[in-house]
């Protein structure tokens, strides 16, 4: 999903540099967009308008993030729900592991969201899962019995689209017909030399053709961007086990190109800055609620927000309290419906 008009699932994508003959490559969910090189492309200059993003060709981006992170005191169990609720104006929720797990709604979520809305809180839902459009996510919320407006939903694919729009990438696209490689003597794979960016998100149909095509574009096309919606290690495709996340696809291409991607999803602050501008939100008046330390909680901390970890998804209490864990949220609790039980206990 690289345009607002077409919000299909995003996987490996590339952006063509020739406006007169846009070239696209994708299998079911992979898309290539056109980029006009008359824009005098320069990676550092293009990113100058987004100080929260940095282009790094060495494998140091994540390390530098962690190096700049100041270790906080151990997270405190949430005891006074009203105090936290009254201290902020906006709650940003991760989805998988917080609102649902797979296709199963987590207990108490509808009542909790209703409570927060009744107290005048703005609710925003941000997910690193790039497999659905806003409309599709809206349908999922509706199917699960939740009243959520599409305008409150932001996926990492939306972040990628917003970033590409900000640097004037066109919206043209076409499918590749599920191409595959036939490795036979003398075979040489051709690629579009006009591709100006490769975008990688979660892809259920990831294959060697996509890895090789993306590799050729990144390594051989001058100035070609490498953008990732996220680097999540795992995802919840079902509610019974963890599955390899988008980070596995990103890692395959990063390994073959020796390039680190520009990540636009959590924990990058690109989305937080976008939301703050769009809604006029003061970041100190936001509470980020998530189930992952290295994406959700770090996302909130990088953005200067309060943070609440819920133990209903990826992170367990033992993981949180592990001495090697340096990412400590302000508070933690079992699930967001604890807002209800904690309030009832203090009445």
Image: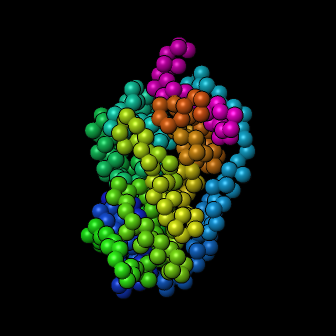
Q: Residue 298 occupies which quadrant of the picture?
A: top right
Q: Residue 186 occupies which quadrant of the picture?
A: bottom left
Residue 96 lies in the magenta stretch: no
Question: Looking at the image, how many numbered discs can be counted on the residues?
Answer: 0
Q: Residue 7 occupies which quadrant of the picture?
A: bottom left
Residue 73 vertical placement versus 77 (above, below) = below
Q: In the image, what residue occupies the spot 39% across and 30% down?
A: 106
Quadrant where the N terminus lies? bottom left
Measured as percent of width and height from the top left, residue 66 is found at 68, 50
Frontmost residue, 172 versus 12? 12
Frontmost residue, 297 versus 288? 297
Measured as percent of width and height from the top left, residue 146 is found at 33, 36
Frontmost residue, 93 versus 258? 258
Measured as percent of width and height from the top left, residue 44 is found at 62, 73
Measured as percent of width and height from the top left, residue 247 is found at 49, 54
Residue 334 lies in the magenta stretch: yes
Residue 146 vertical placement versus 300 (above, below) = above
Frontmost residue, 249 versus 53? 249
Stretch of the chain drawn in magenta: 320-347
Q: Tell me if 301 is positioned left or right of 288 in this view.
A: right
Residue 346 vertical placement versus 332 (above, below) = above
Q: Is residue 66 visible?
A: yes
């Amino acid at each position: 999903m690289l345009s607002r008009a077409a919000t299909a699932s995003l996987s490996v994508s590339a952006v063509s540099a020739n406006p007169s003959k846009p070239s696209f490559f994708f299998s079911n969910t992979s898309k290539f967009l056109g980029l006009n090189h008359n824009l005098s492309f320069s990676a550092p200059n293009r990113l100058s308008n987004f100080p929260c993003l940095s282009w790094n060709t060495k494998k140091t981006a994540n390390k530098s993030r962690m190096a700049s992170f100041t270790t906080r005191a151990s997270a405190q169990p949430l005891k006074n729900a009203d105090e936290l609720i009254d201290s902020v104006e906006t709650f940003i929720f991760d989805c998988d592991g917080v609102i649902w797990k797979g296709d199963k709604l987590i207990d108490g979520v509808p009542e909790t969201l209703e409570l927060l809305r009744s107290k005048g809180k703005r609710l925003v839902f941000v997910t690193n899962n790039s497999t659905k459009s806003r409309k599709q996510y809206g349908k999922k919320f509706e199917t699960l019995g939740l009243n959520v407006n599409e305008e409150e939903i932001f996926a990492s694919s939306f972040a990628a689209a917003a970033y590409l729009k900000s640097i004037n990438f066109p919206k043209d696209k076409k499918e590749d017909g599920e191409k595959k490689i036939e490795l036979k003597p003398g075979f040489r794979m051709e690629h579009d030399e006009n591709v100006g960016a490769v975008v990688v998100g979660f892809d259920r149909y990831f294959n060697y053709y996509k890895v090789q095509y993306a590799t050729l574009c990144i390594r051989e096309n001058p100035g070609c961007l490498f953008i990732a919606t996220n680097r999540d290690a795992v995802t919840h495709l079902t509610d019974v086990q963890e599955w390899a996340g988008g980070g596995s696809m990103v890692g395959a291409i990063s390994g073959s190109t020796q390039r680190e991607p520009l990540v636009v999803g959590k924990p990058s602050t690109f989305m937080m800055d976008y939301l703050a501008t769009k809604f006029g939100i003061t970041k100190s008046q936001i509470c980020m609620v998530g189930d992952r330390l290295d994406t959700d909680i770090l996302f909130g901390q990088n953005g200067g927000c309060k943070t609440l970890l819920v133990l209903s998804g990826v992170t367990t209490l033992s993981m949180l309290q592990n001495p090697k864990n340096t990412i400590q949220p302000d508070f933690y609790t079992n699930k967001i419906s604890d807002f209800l039980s904690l309030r009832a206990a203090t009445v």
